[in-house]
């Protein structure tokens, strides 16, 4: 392909990316309307010392880590089970695990209102069985956010781990078993280490998704359990504090970049060894 | 995935290990059960989101279909998703061709640039577009939403059609050229058919992503043009009745249709596997 036609193919896409994404993003960081970059930095400094703001950052990170851990612990067994089975049911179960990815987050998160709400399933069961007098407050807690996010990101963990496990030769498993290793031992010494790069990718995707998700903390956390995303929205649309909104946006973006960077390093190390 | 390894796989779906089996079951419960409760409560005859539902009725479906903000939002969301997907493909496929077939330095960097909207949190992109395009440049919210969604879908268009193009043998196109076909004709008759699975995947993925998007769209809503997920989100926050359960169930039913189409055309495990690599 000639250089000129290559350039012609690239130009519209590049121009679009510049106008629709890159320029606005850069402009927002350095010059939000009516605010200087110095003010954004000052606000960010205040954020990193204020106990309330720090609490929100820490809650966001903590929830992200817990959700990531749960998604890997639940997702990897599902993925290895499905990737190692030839049963027709495995295809159905894989489809069932991936299907939620097509479904609106609003619909998926709404389910937890039905389950955890004051008239919800769990409350009804607990009071119906006489275990508690009054249904416990389950909504607007960190637990609710964690459950909602696990539901949201588990399919992503499953499909990412699935492609990792599918690339590990099942013959290695069989060989280890033939040489006398137990199922547990061959799982930990063969399958897990060999699919580690995929597990790292899954963990990164889940963490980045969890710390930036909006729908779930908005519906299940309410205003008492603020995360960076809900706080950012409130700065931008309720209090219209552009400096604070930009500062929050920077903190959130840096968090995601940091974790992606660390996992890229870990992944590279894993690939060498 | 094929060849001699097949025999060594278990034919039945045995839960090989009790701990792994328990974890897998727990995972499915978390993924699926809340969705089933949404469907169950949608059929209630009562007026609260209570489980078990008080009697069976289809009345909330009627209410949802008659509620004009939802119906207008469905049309808006469809319009936006179709346009954004078409635009992302129209811009992204040429980029893919340039990256894979052109002789240019810094291909990795260029691809990274086009994937970058995936890395920046969507809420942050939404904030940037709201501040700079809607407030700063006074663009209307539909145009801003369209720009934002297209930027969001570009990575899918470039990555997923790129995976398809990587599998297509350039020698076939050269052979067509050697036999006298013009570059355009060689592209249309040889390369494009090989790209079809990628185009379908990217199209479906783009459509679904745009249609369901909340974080990027959230700040870009106005009374004139509102998308469905954001309208539903607001409704849930104001009133807590089974109408949203009914609306959700309708969305679920439509999604099942999309899933079946996806499964029949490319296989949706493949569609969703394509973007993560």
Image: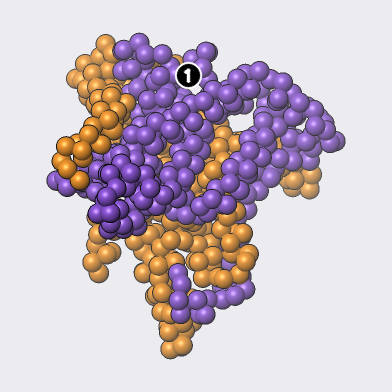
- Which quadrant holds residue B240? top right
User: What is the residue that sits farthest to the bottom in this orientation?
Assistant: A179
Would residue A59 be found to the left or right of residue A270 on screen? Answer: right
Q: Quadrant of the N terminus of chain B?
A: bottom left
- Give chain B's shade: purple
According to the image, label 1 marks what residue?
B221
For the rendered model, the colour scheme is: by chain
Q: Colour of chain A?
A: orange
Q: Chain of mark 1?
A: B
Whether residue B265 is visible here, answered yes or no, is yes
Please report the residue visible at 41 percent of the width from the left and 63 percent of the height from the top: A164
- Location of residue A112 in the rendering, given as x and y in whole percent from the top left corner: 62, 40
- Write down the quadrant of residue B150 in the picture: top left
The residue lying furthest to the right in this view is B55
Residue A216 in picture, x, y percent from top left: 52, 36
Q: Is residue B85 above or below residue B136?
A: below
Mark 1: give few (<14), some (14-19) or many (20+) Cα within 10 Å: some
Residue located at (28% from left, 56% from top)? B175
Q: Nearer the viewer, residue A40 or B272?
A: B272
Please state if A243 lies on the left or on the right of A208 as rendered: left
Foreground of the two, B96 or A55: B96
Residue at the image position 36 percent from the left and 69 percent from the top: A194
Q: Is residue B169 above or below residue B120?
A: below
Task: Tell me where residue B74 appears, x and y as whole percent.
Answer: 59, 26
- Secondary structure of the residue carrying tag 1 is loop
Residue A93 against residue B211 in the figure, above or below: below
Q: Is residue B195 visible?
A: no
| Residue under the image location 25 percent in, 69 percent down | A273
């Amino acid at each position: 392909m000639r250089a000129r036609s290559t350039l012609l193919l690239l130009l519209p896409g590049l121009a679009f990316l510049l106008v629709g994404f890159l320029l606005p993003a850069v402009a927002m960081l350095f010059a939000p309307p009516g605010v200087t970059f110095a003010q954004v930095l000052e606000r960010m400094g205040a954020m990193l010392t204020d106990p309330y703001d720090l609490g929100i950052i820490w809650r966001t990170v903590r929830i992200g880590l817990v959700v990531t851990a749960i998604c890997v612990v639940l997702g990897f067994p599902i993925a290895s089970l499905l990737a190692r089975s030839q049963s027709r049911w495995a295809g159905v179960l894989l489809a069932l695990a991936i299907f939620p990815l097509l479904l609106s987050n609003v619909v998926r998160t709404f389910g937890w209102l039905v389950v955890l709400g004051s008239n919800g399933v769990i409350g009804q069961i607990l009071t119906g069985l006489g275990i508690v007098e009054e249904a416990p407050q389950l909504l607007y807690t960190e637990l609710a956010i964690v459950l909602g996010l696990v539901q949201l990101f588990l399919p992503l963990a499953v499909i990412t781990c699935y492609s990792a496990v599918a690339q590990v030769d099942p013959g290695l498993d069989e060989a280890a078993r033939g040489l006398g290793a137990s199922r547990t031992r061959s799982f930990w010494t063969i399958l897990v280490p060999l699919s580690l790069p995929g597990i790292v990718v899954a963990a990164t995707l889940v963490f980045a998704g969890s710390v930036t998700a909006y729908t779930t903390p908005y519906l299940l956390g309410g205003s008492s359990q603020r995360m960076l995303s809900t706080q950012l929205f409130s700065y931008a649309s309720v209090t219209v504090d552009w400096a604070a909104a930009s500062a929050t946006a920077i903190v959130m973006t840096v968090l995601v970049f940091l974790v992606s960077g660390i996992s890229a390093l870990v992944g590279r190390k894993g690939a060498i060894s | 995935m094929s060849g001699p390894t097949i025999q060594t796989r278990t034919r039945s779906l045995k839960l090989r290990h009790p701990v792994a089996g328990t974890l897998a079951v727990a995972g499915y419960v978390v993924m699926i059960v809340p969705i089933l409760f949404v469907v169950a409560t949608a059929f209630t005859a009562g007026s609260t989101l209570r489980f078990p539902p008080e009697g069976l009725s289809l009345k909330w479906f009627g209410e949802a279909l008659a509620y004009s903000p939802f119906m207008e939002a469905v049309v808006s969301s469809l319009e936006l998703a179709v346009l954004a997907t078409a635009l992302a493909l129209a811009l992204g496929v040429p980029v893919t061709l340039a990256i894979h077939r052109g002789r240019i330095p810094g291909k990795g960097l260029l691809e990274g640039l086009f994937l970058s909207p995936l890395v920046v949190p969507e809420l942050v992109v939404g904030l940037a577009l709201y501040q700079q395009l809607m407030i700063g440049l006074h663009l209307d919210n539909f145009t801003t939403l369209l720009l934002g969604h297209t930027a969001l879908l570009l990575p899918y268009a470039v990555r997923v059609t790129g995976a398809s193009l990587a599998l297509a043998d350039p020698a076939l196109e050269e052979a067509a050229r050697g036999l006298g076909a013009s570059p355009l004709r060689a592209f249309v008759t040889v390369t494009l058919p090989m790209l079809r699975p990628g185009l379908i995947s990217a199209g479906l993925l783009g459509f679904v992503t745009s249609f369901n998007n909340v974080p990027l769209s959230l700040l870009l809503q106005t009374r004139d043009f509102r998308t469905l997920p954001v309208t539903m989100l607001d409704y849930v926050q104001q009133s807590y009745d089974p109408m949203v359960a009914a609306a959700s169930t309708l969305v679920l039913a439509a999604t099942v249709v999309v899933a079946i189409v996806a499964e029949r055309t490319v296989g949706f495990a493949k569609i969703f596997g394509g973007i993560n690599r």
